[in-house]
Amino acid sequence: MTELSSIKDQVAVVSGGAAGIGLACAERFAAEGAKVAIIDRDRETGEAAVRKIETDGGEAMFTAGDCTSEADMDAAVAAIVDRWGRLDILVNCAGGFHAAPPIEELDAETWRAGIDWNLSGIYLPMRAVVPAMKTNNYGRIVSIGSQAGRMGTAITAIDYSAAKAAVVGLSRRLAVELAPFGITVNTVAPGTVLTPRIAVLHAERMDQLASAMPVGRLGKPEEIAHAVWYLCTPGAAFTTGATLDVNGGSWTG
Ligand SMILES: NC(=O)c1ccc[n+]([C@@H]2O[C@H](COP(=O)([O-])OP(=O)(O)OC[C@H]3O[C@@H](n4cnc5c(N)ncnc54)[C@H](O)[C@@H]3O)[C@@H](O)[C@H]2O)c1
């Protein structure tokens, strides 16, 4: 069974891996024996995350970069391949939003910035890693979408919901293109997960959000990391173009 589930010695890249869901993925992969590269625009927390992984006995590196920058993503991936000589896994976690105004108050500049952050910021890391994955005829790409891209929610930004829905389309399209190269491309769509960002963003309605969940609580970052881990294992080779809703039962189809 080990050959189906082991990612030991594989090279895993986690965008937005300095905090929240991305950090949980980075820590999980390191615990599974993978070499983990964190790409994040926050150098301080990114370097702290790498130190913690190393203290726990894992192997990790940090590369500063903004996922909306083509130059940053190309340079980050080049540095990772330069250090470890290969690249097996990409998990796209960078994303978010700051406010959720009604459409009349959503100006075009904020809309474009939200699409750039949550859609271009997924496309550019994907684009950067594919050549290295094709070299080995193997790859696992997982992007963190959102329940907000799967159903109508009033508490998320309009641009964010639109971009997260588009991540599903992007991943399905790429899954078809990359299937002949042994590369799978999937999406994990979480419901509300208790990360530091969410604790601040929704500070006044945490109880309300938790009680709206069929399981009666918010998700934990490590529960999302567990779903991501499955999609990144060798045994998930037949799972591609899929969207895995991890939301405590909120999604009803
Ligand atoms: N927490 C939730 O409830 C929830 C639910 C559904 C989807 N998501 C998605 O999961 C992902 C992670 O969310 P989180 O709550 O863990 O967020 P978080 O803010 O706790 O962590 C995000 C990390 O990504 C980094 N980052 C953000 N944008 C970046 C960029 N353009 N380039 C480089 N680094 C960047 C941040 O510096 C931070 O370290 C996001 O895509 C978010 O939309 C979160």
Image (tube, rainbow, N blue to C red):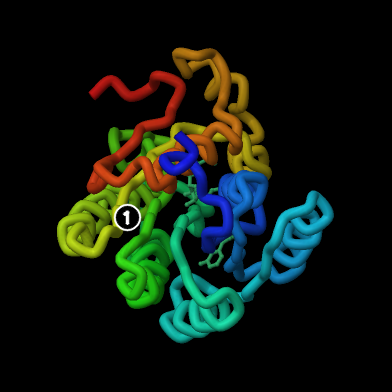
Q: Counting other residues with Cα less than 10 Å from the Cα at mark 1, is it few (<14), some (14-19), or many (20 or more)?
A: many
In the image, residue 1 above or below residue 140 = above
Coordinates of residue 144 in the picture (x, y in percent): 42, 48
Q: Which residue is at the front of the view, 115 or 166?
A: 166
Give residue 166's position: percent from left, percent from top: 26, 54
Three-letter amino acid code of the residue under disc 1 = Ala
Does residue 17 appear to the left or right of 245 in the view shown?
right
Q: Where is residue 151 in the image (x, y as percent from the top left)?
A: 29, 33
Note whether 15 is above or below 29 in the view shown. Answer: below
Q: Which of 75 and 157 is in front in this view?
A: 75
Does residue 107 appear in this view? no
Q: Which residue is drawn at 83% across and 55% down?
A: 55
Is residue 60 at least partly visible in the picture? yes
Q: Give the quadrant of residue 180.
A: bottom left
Q: Nearer the viewer, residue 197 or 220?
A: 220
| Residue that carries the numbered disc 1 in the rendered image | 163
Q: Residue at x 47, y 40 (%)?
A: 5
Does residue 93 lie above or below 205 as drawn?
below
Label 1 residue SS: helix
**Residue under the point 61% across and 61% down:** 35
Compared across the picture, whether 180 is left or right of 8 comes to left
Quarter that holds the N terminus: top left
Residue 245 picture location, percent across and down: 36, 32
Q: Looking at the image, how many numbered discs can be counted on the residues?
A: 1
Residue 122 occupies quadrant? bottom left
Name the residue rendered at 47%, 68% in the picture: 87
Q: In this view, does 162 lie to the left or right of 176?
A: right
* Image quarter hosting the C terminus: top left
